[in-house]
Image (cartoon, rainbow, N blue to C red):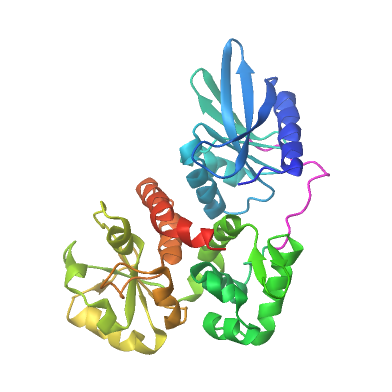
Amino acid sequence: MDQKAGDIDWVEAALVALHRTTGMQARIRHGRRDPGGEAPVAAISLRRGDAAHRYAVECRRSVRTVADLSVVRAQLQERAPGLLVTTYLTPALAGQCREMGLQFLDTAGNTFLDAPELFVFVIGQTPPDSVVRPAVRISGNPSSQRMVFALLCQPELLQATYREIARVSGIALGSVGAVFNGLSARGWLLETREDEGRRLTAPDRLLDEWVANYPTILRHRLQPRRFSAPAADWWQAVNATELGGYWSGEVAAAAMVGGIRPASQTLYIAPARMAGALQMLTQKHRLQPDPDGTVEVLEAFWDPSVEGLESPPPGRPDLAPPVLVYADLMATLDADHLAEATQLRKARIKDVLDRF
């Protein structure tokens, strides 16, 4: 993630707040380019007694959900030790950071630091009056979620007509302009000369935002159902295509990057095929309704034309687009799933984002 001048201001404000609440000394070292990465990152050093600690910093203006924290932790995995800097974290989210092992500072003075010879956990500090209210997120409603998903899966769609974008996204024609306006307002979309068309300036950040919003804005509307299975390998006998379905989660990740033994199964079914699919799953494959089961079935929400646009493995039309597989893994907050998601992003999603 690019650390812009305004982000550095937040880092400085958070370091001042850290000194106020803990007495610790800290300073910004410099901005550097992350080895093997593309975006410059800020580095800071903290000192307590004779012990010094250096962190790579990820700045987020607004962190509102556990899913947001999950995205940040995944981004910082390769820059360890990493530190989230934000304007304000609620006590509940601060507690989640501690459980996840995600170190953070905010401009209110709340902090969680856990390193050799250093442990600090401060919560309950109120945000300063100067904290800017979070901007409305581009992917903050179901229609925008659907459209952003289609764009992330199919970069060429960005140059299509509004009517075609609406058709592929499954949204009203009038919603397309609203999403583009939101992207433009944040500097994430450039409307260039007619021969160059539209260009996304921050596809990685747009993906992160979509992934963070997906569980609370769109996913819960897809009629999720959970089941238990009679055997751990039951899914290997299922032809998802015959059911009108697509594997996501661990099953899809195993096919896309390998080295994964699926312990849970996520299956999206076309709404028109759902009744027949559920009958087949419960009668032939003996799935039993179970709110704590490891099998989850949801309604597919994307146009079938999106399927081939991310080039699923040969002979596997039964897999959901990698962007969705990535989002489902991230939403679990499970450490193993987050590691699998990181592999998937490198292997299957990065090249797609580069096409913007």
Number of marks in picture: 0
Q: Identify the residue at image location x=25%, y=51%.
A: 259
- In the image, residue 346 sits, relative to residue 15, either above or below, namely below
Question: Does the magenta run of residues contain 192?
Answer: no
Spot occupied by residue 285 in the image (x, y as percentages of width and height):
18, 76
Q: Looking at the picture, tell me which residue is in the foreground, 271 or 96.
A: 271
Quarter residue 50 falls in: top right
Residue ranking furthest to the right: 129
Magenta residues, dominant SS class: loop
Q: Identify the residue at image location x=26%, y=57%.
A: 263
Spot occupied by residue 218 in the image (x, y as percentages of width and height):
53, 71
Spot occupied by residue 353 in the image (x, y as percentages of width and height):
52, 60
Q: Identify the residue at image location x=78%, y=46%.
A: 131
Quarter residue 51 falls in: top right
Residue ranking furthest to the top: 50
Q: Looking at the picture, tell me which residue is in the foreground, 57 or 349.
A: 349
- In the image, residue 202 sits, relative to residue 230, either above or below, namely above
Q: Identify the residue at image location x=72%, y=42%.
A: 7
Spot occupied by residue 134 in the image (x, y as percentages of width and height):
73, 55
In the rendered view, does 257 fall on the left or right side of 143? left
Question: Does the magenta run of residues contain 127?
Answer: yes
- In the image, residue 244 sits, relative to residue 332, either above or below, namely below
Quarter holding the C terminus? bottom right
Residue ranking furthest to the front: 195
Quarter residue 349 falls in: bottom left
Q: Looking at the picture, tell me which residue is in the foreground, 120 or 83.
A: 83
- Is residue 223 visible in the rendered image? The answer is no
Q: Which residues are magenta?
A: 123-136
- Is residue 337 visible in the rendered image? The answer is yes
- In the image, residue 211 sits, relative to residue 45, either above or below, namely below
